[in-house]
Image (tube, grey):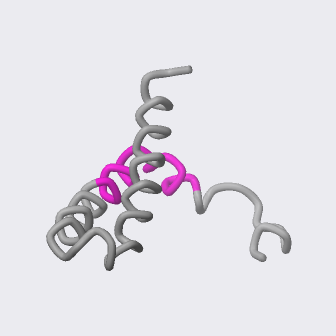
Amino acid sequence: MSGKMKWKIAVDILMTLALLVLMSYGMAGEAVHEWTGMGMFVLFILHHILNRSWTANLGKGRYTSFRIL
């Protein structure tokens, strides 16, 4: 497994955990919710940077009805 793939998996796991913390606002508290939200934003940007090749390839290839759906 390449280093980039390990980063992708780590970011995805951290985003999942952050989402769980963000959803438990009542249990975590306002400060934790705010800091986790800022961390989630950073992870969101990093996720899109790591997956930019997928975004670049969206327009390539043949568009079948299944792909459009």
From the viewer's perspective, is 43 left or right of 52?
left
Residue farthest right in this picture: 65
Which quarter shows the C terminus? bottom right
Whether 41 is among the magenta residues is no
Residue farthest front in this picture: 27
Residue 19: image location, x then y, percent:
41, 64
Q: Quadrant of residue 61?
A: bottom right
Q: Quadrant of residue 29?
A: bottom left
68 lies above or below 16: below
Whether 54 is among the magenta residues is yes
65 lies above or below 18: below
Pick the front one: 51 or 7? 7
From the viewer's perspective, is 31 left or right of 40?
left
What secondary structure is the stretch in magenta mostly built from?
Answer: helix
Identified at 49% across, 39% down, the residue is: 9
Which quarter shows the N terminus? top right
Identified at 30% across, 61% down, the residue is: 40
Identified at 57% across, 53% down, the residue is: 57
Range covered by the magenta-colored residues: 43-57
The tally of labels here is 0
Residue 25: image location, x then y, percent:
32, 76
Residue 53: image location, x then y, percent:
49, 46
Residue 14: image location, x then y, percent:
39, 48
From the viewer's perspective, is 15 left or right of 62?
left
Q: Quadrant of residue 30?
A: bottom left
65 lies above or below 54: below
Pick the front one: 58 or 30? 30
Pick the front one: 28 or 45? 28
